[in-house]
Amino acid sequence: VSEDFYFIFLFFIIYSFVAVLNNILPVQTGVKAQEEEQSSGMTIFFSLLVIGICIILVHLLIKFKLHFLPESVAVVSLGILMGGIIKIIEFQELANWKEEEMFRPNMFFLLILPPIIFESGYSLHKGNFFQNIGSITLFAVIGTIISAFIVGGGIYFLGQADVIYKMTMTDSFAFGSLISAVDPVATIAIFNALNVDPVLNMLVFGESILNDAVSIVLTNTAEGVFSHSDSSMVTGWETFIQALGNFLTMFFGSAALGTLTGVISALFLKHFDLRKTPSLEFGMMIIFAYIPYGLAEGIKLSGIMSILFAGIVMSHYTHHNLSPVTQILMQQTLRTVAFMCETCVFAFLGLSIFSFPHKFEMSFVIWCIVLVLLGRAVNIFPLSFLLNFFRDHKITPKMMFIMWFSGLRGAIPYALSLHLGLEPIEKRQLIGTTTIIIVLFTILLLGGGTMPLIRIMDIEDNSQSRRKNKKDINLSKTQKMGNTIEADHLSELTEEEYEAHIYQRQDLKGFMWLDAKYLNPFFTRRLTQEDLLHGRIQMKTLTNKWYEEVRQGPSGSEDEEDEAELL
């Protein structure tokens, strides 16, 4: 099982990487092909080297219990340090790694970003997510649009007043859209550290995940509609209606495609029993995970939005049709791949300071930071106040402030800024430089100020329980995700047990009742006693095999004492 699994997984990764390189690099023959092969080999080597160093850094953070420092802050700082060292080496003409340290936007969108987004949707707590889908959608869609209009409109009008660099309405709105994407990794780390209400935690996490997809769709809308419209023939209202129609089509079309892929995968694995061959089962899950992204991009929809909804639906239905071995493999594999992709992005974000030519304008950067903070505030505070009229779990002013403070920017704005086809070249350099500064400002200053903020909030609460748990505050996502397995992903309910469970849950309403009563039984397989027995035997066999190999080690005589101490 393990050999087949690793073969399929490695084949998928290598094939995806080669496919991305083929899309990025033109086809060459002869001597040029050999040079491209050498260049690609050095790029792969450099990327793996950077990721390896970052993994060692994260391990040291966990080992020495530096839990107050978010991993994203540490990895970005390491990237900046490595970029400076490489720059010194290039200046001394000892080596030239400029090509290897370049961040390619196509590689980011085709290879690195999909696992991150899919894992985010796959690891969502579905109960709280569906119960708060209205609030999450309001923050993610309406809030992101508000932030994009405030930032974009502010840049446009300040440029018209000759206060900052003058930009067109199209470019201003595109920049406002891309810079409105918040980073869910740092955001959820803050809320996990604060031990906030699970519903509020899901509200912010769900908003931050959907926000990324909405921001990408808005940016693509600005590029596709405004840049191709003839201003002499089309009025402003017609352009707005066209942009709104394009946004709604891309948003709901991509969501529908991802949802359809998810339910098809659930029905397929329900009626095609692959539980006794976990390698084939896992291979089908990987295929179904990436299919919606490629199809959506091929028909000019949003692959990110599609793969996000596919992850949510596959986790809610398809996952329960898998064998216990494949369930654990999916969780841990997705977390590992997402961690490596996130680490790679943050490291290259720090390296980018020395990788590209920059155009820096102090007034433009300062006003953009002010507008970004203002846009986040206008997004969070009014919408939270409005939602409190309809919510049982109220969003307190302190929580509103933390939500505003935790609106950190990450890799998506940076990659989108490189993906924009702006002319002239100085405008592209200005947008890229400003985006890097805003991302680093939010990650290093706001992210680095997370622990002081938590301590201030604890002092304000005067809560003895929080003071006792202050040493337990942990901003390491890797350690938390590595120590847990989602309990709701390992349920073993038979048909009779499931019906009894639903009968006891009389508080279910709306979609939750419809899902529990009709959708879940239709898309998922109810286990028989034989299925339960086979799954437990399969897990027990693997566990015993591993445990026997461990007990055969040189320290086997002390295993029982060590085990008792750990327990």
Image: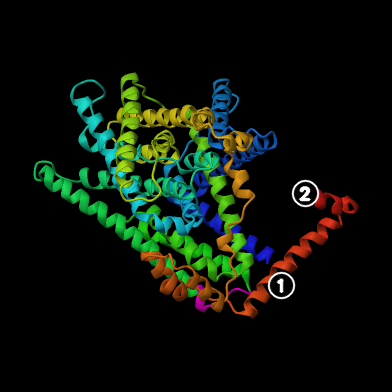
Badge 1 element: helix
**Residue 225 vs residue 146, the one in the foreground:** 146
Query: Is 346 placed above or below 510 here?
Result: above
Picture quadrant where residue 232 is located: top left
Query: Is 195 placed above or below 133 here?
Result: above
- Marks 1 and 2 close (CB-CB < 8 Å): no
Label 1 is placed on what type of residue?
Ile
Q: Which of marks 1 and 2 is nearer the N terminus?
A: 1
Query: Is 399 placed above or below 493 here?
Result: above
Query: What residue is disc 2 on?
Result: 566
**Residue 152 vs residue 299, the one in the foreground:** 152
* Residue at (52% x, 27% y) in the render: 452
Other-residue count near label 2 (Cα within 10 Å), few / some / many at <14 / 14–19 / ≥20: few
Label 2 is placed on what type of residue?
Leu
* Residue at (29% x, 55% y) in the render: 250
Left or right: 252 as drawn, with respect to 479: left
Badge 2 element: helix
Q: Position of residue 275 (x, y in %)?
A: 60, 73
Q: Where is residue 311 in the image (x, y as percent from the top left)?
A: 46, 59
Locate the N terminus and report the quarter of the image it occupies: bottom right
Q: Say whether residue 429 is magenta.
A: no
> What is the C-alpha distance between the residues marked 1 and 2?
25 Å
- Majority secondary structure of the magenta segment? loop
Identify the mark at residue 250; answer none if there is no mark: none
Query: What residue is disc 1 on?
Result: 537
Q: Magenta region: which residues?
A: 269-276
Between disc 1 and disc 2, the foreground one is 2
Q: Where is residue 513 in the image (x, y as percent from the top left)?
A: 40, 68
Q: Where is residue 283 in the image (x, y as percent from the top left)?
A: 56, 66
Looking at the image, can residue 26 be seen?
Answer: no
